Image (tube, coloured by chain):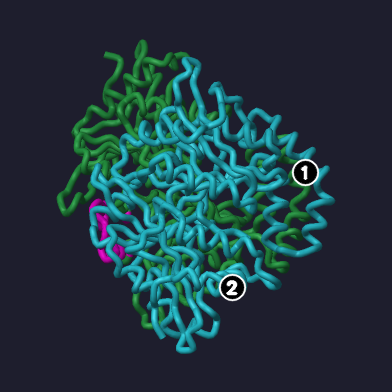
Chain colours: A cyan, B green
Amino acid sequence: MAVRPLAESDIPQVVDLYWTYMRKRKGAIPRELVTLFRELFFVNPFSDNELPSLVYEAPDGKVKGFLGRNVRRMSYYGRMIRVVFGGNLVVHPEFRSGVAAPRLVNTFMSGNHDLALTDSANNVSKNILQRMGYSVVPALNIHWRRPLRPTHYAVYGLSVKADSLALSAIRVAAKPICSIADSLASKFAASPFRLTKSRLLGAELDLETLLQCMAEFRKGYSLWPEYNLSSLKWLLGFMESRPARGSLRKIVLRDEARNIVGWYIYYVKPGAIGEVVQIHGDEKLTKDILDHLFWDALDHGVIGLHGVVDSRHTADFSDKGCFFTCRGGWTVASSRDPEIMKSLERGDALFTRLDGEWCLDPGD
Amino acid sequence: MPIRALTEADIPQVSDLYWKYLRHRGDPVPPHLHKVFHELCFRSPFTEDNVHPLVFEDNNRVVGFSGGFVRRMSFCGRSIRMLVGGNLVFHPDFRNGHTAPEFVKTFFAQDADLAIVDSANNLGRKVLLRNEFRVIPALNVHWIRPLKPAQYALYGLSHSLGSFLSSSLNLSKPFCSLTDRIIARMGVGLPRPKKSNLRGTELDAATLLHCLLEFRNGYSLWPEYGLSSLQWLLGFMEQRAARGTLRKILLWDDSDKIAGWYIYYVKPRSVGEVVQLGGPPDGTKEILDHLFQDALGQGLIGLHGVVEMRRMPDFSEKGCIFTCRGGWTMARSRDPELLKLLEVDALFTRLDGEWCLDPGE
């Protein structure tokens, strides 16, 4: 039984593990998932031959465990560092009590990198990773939530959580009442759900502009991701091709003098929650950027927004009616360099959902 | 000179300002409030001769007041003075946009290594930002834990609506109780508080002092107390009825070792304000389980507090949500290292600033 690098020929078995035991789905595996895994782990600009994804092979030669790996380049005080992301850790149930998961994680961690991160671990993975020396970094685990249509949001939350047919039916039946309540909630001047019209101007965000924005607005951080046009193009293309989260919307914001002051990228899913990938810009204008995002999302039929907040902006997000939780996928980190860990803990890292493995989720 | 140190003779005028313009009360000032201000400003162990609460005077009339205290903190083992500002109030005729900032500037010009405010409102935040104070994100994470979600939602609504609508909402209390029971039975919504394995007993000042010493490892900045200052502080807090009854619980594990503690205000059928929760970091979830069960047993519908960022994941796993609403903590120091430590390494709770020294009603 051994841990070895993932080979292209393993893909069908890995996809099977992922589909059956991670997504907990029955029935035939969608054919495009095999193509997708191949792209994710062999074509992707963040795959690295020196640090490949890993499989756990049983004595009969069958693949019984998998740990995906992506390698990102980041700048730490201007020095280029190698950051590895582990994701989609899945082990066949018959091998879960043994050494499969620890061996996969140990091999993963022994690779040549400056920082190892996972940004969407579930509770089980988080516990395994903590035992292997990873730490939960509170500053990277503050998820924000902003109900835009509060009663729709509450009913949606309950029905998704309970996963019962009866509650789904209640959700549909309650729609007209929710709409009236939401319209009232947005009318009261003192209501935390009332939206303010932004004075910023939005336009479609293209790749070159995004790259320029990232370089422009990283001042004040000690750790940030490095992109070039081709890696960013591949990444956004990949994200756009995954329909599970909705359609990807990318907006650049300008002030009255037509200067770029910020941007946001989020998934639009009408009647559901919009997942915000990245929101950033001039920190003095965070509230204006949020105002624009909220209007835009409401316009597109989104009932609430979720995202991960940069810990230094929590006050502005709170002022704009957001609340926070740590639920929504754990970010855990490990580094041999304690200074890098301190930077993460201090909230000195410019690190968003675009920069890890969250955006590389293969989906359903 | 319109700005000067507070004297004992000013107390009636200060109480009057506080009552009318900070508490927005129209009835006469309760006589005990004079005593409270007197004790706070002249008898508290956190007063020092060279740092004074200030008043702003116009034609021999007190029209502005800023309370303040000095707390001793340890900064990597070195004792430092922390100036804590509180209860800034101005007569409406003097809220001209210049007086308050000038007043704040004068107050915080008094000698200290670190200046802090832990319950500024939005207006206070603006004034302090103009005085080079910074919002410290790590000290501004307020946690909320509804224990009875429907009743808690009703409580929240009735506090944000006018008094007429609030009274109408009160009619739906029985319906909310029923909803809470249904929600609990269906297992939807927030996770139900678990029964804790820890055993709780009454916490006294001497044991609290011991706990504070014992569990400050891993921090670089922490508050310093003596037995008498802690006794005075807890005594003062116990006398303030507005927030409820102060409950102080020490927790023990199976082997009779101290496993943590918590202090909170109990107000049945209302929200309990948690002053301090302490103990080993890996025991946070057990402590929370005990606290939630205890609060439910005391008839509370929810709990509020301020969480240390390093404990946030555990609080979240126990069904807490977070906001920055509930009073701003802001700080200023000439030493950038001190401000950096506040971001990640400070043991600073509601017991250690001015929140717990609120004169109340």
Discs 1/2, front: 2
Amino acid type at mark 1: Cys
Residue interval drawn in magenta: B208-231
Residue A171, image x, y percentages = 78, 53
Can residue B162 be seen in the rendering of this structure? no
How many labels sit on residues? 2
Picture quadrant of residue A214? top left
Which of the two residues, B53 or B109, is positioned nearer the viewer here? B109
The residue pinned by badge 2 equals: A16
- Drawn side of residue B143 relative to residue B354, left or right: right
Q: Quadrant of the N terminus of chain B?
A: top left
Q: Residue at x 42, y 67 (%)?
A: A53
Q: Residue at x 36, y 45 (%)?
A: A225
- Drawn side of residue B5 relative to residue A236, left or right: left
Label 2: state its secondary structure.
helix
Estimate the spatial distance between the alpha carbons at disc 1 and disc 2, rounded to whole Å.
41 Å
N-terminal of the pair, mark 1 or mark 2, is 2
User: Dot 1 surroundings within 10 Å: few (below 14), some, or many (20 or more)?
Assistant: many
Residue A177 forms part of the magenta stretch: no
Residue A20, image x, y percentages = 62, 73
Amino acid type at mark 2: Asp
The residue pinned by badge 1 equals: A178
- Drawn side of residue A39 relative to residue A311, left or right: right
- Drawn side of residue B227 relative to residue B296, left or right: left
Residue A351, image x, y percentages = 40, 47
Residue B213 forms part of the magenta stretch: yes
Q: Residue at x 34, y 60 (%)?
A: A116
Q: Is residue B69 above or below residue B284?
A: above
Which of the two residues, A290 or B30, is positioned nearer the viewer here? A290
Picture quadrant of residue B46? top left
**Chain letter of the residue carrying label 1:** A
* Callouts 1 and 2 in the same chain: yes
